[in-house]
Image (spheres, helix red, strand yellow):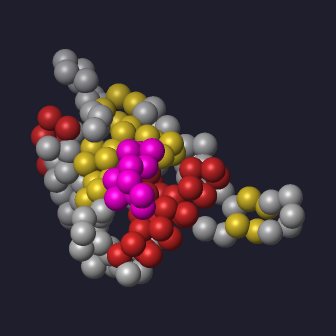
Amino acid sequence: MHNKRLYMDWQRMQLLHKNSGLIDIEAFGDPPERYILTYSCKGLIWLPGNPAPSISHQHRFELYLNTDYPRLPPVFRCLTSIFHPNILPPERNGGVCIGSWTPAETLDSLCIRLGEMIQYRNYSLTDILDLKAAKWASAHRDSFPLDTREFWKHRKEADDEIIIL
């Protein structure tokens, strides 16, 4: 069951990579149990000495599927600096609080949800990992989302087959 789900997820991740100009996906293993995701979208970082966060256009994450996946959720770790209520930068362990998850949610869907978190289209002020970012986000809600581009686009193939993700 575990390997079958890993292969299904890998197929969907390949489609996501093919149909999204905003996520680059590197996979490790056969079937992959580890991914490196590079998001090319607007998110926030707080540069030392600056009075406010700045826009960053590239964000990298590691995604690990443990041996109990899909019974247990995937583990994300942020690899680049970020300023977000639900994501810690690498110097603070890179933890990511993805919120509610069920085994029925596909891996590509979860990766899109993470991208929407980076864009501040989807974030939580109740499941907080970074209190400073949560306070700032709460005071600047009118600034969000930072980026409205979609991660997954429906695409009509030449043979008229519709890929719906």
- Left or right relative to 164: residue 69: left
Q: Position of residue 122 (x, y in %)?
A: 40, 59
Quarter of the image for the N terminus: give it: bottom left
Horizontal side of residue 71 vs 8, given as left or right: left
Q: Quadrant of the C terminus?
A: bottom right
Name the magenta segment's main secondary structure: strand
- Whether residue 51 is visible here, answered yes or no, is yes
Q: Magenta span has 30?
A: yes
- Tell me: 61 left or right of 159: left
- Which residue is more in the foreground, 128 or 137? 128
**Foreground: 83 or 72?**
72
Q: Residue at x 29, y 72 (%)?
A: 69
The quarter of the displayed image where residue 48 is located: top left
Q: Where's residue 27, x and y in %?
A: 43, 49
Q: x%, y% of residue 46?
A: 26, 30
- Indicate the position of residue 158 as horizontal and vertical percent values: 86, 58
| Residue that sits furthest to the front in the current view | 30
In percent of the image, x 16 and y 53: which residue is there? 129
Residue 98 appears in view: no
Q: Determine whether, in the image, residue 148 is placed left or right of residue 31.
A: right
The residue stretch that appears in magenta: 26-37
Residue name at image x 36 percent, y 39 percent: 60
Q: Residue at x 51, y 58 (%)?
A: 13
> Magenta includes 90?
no
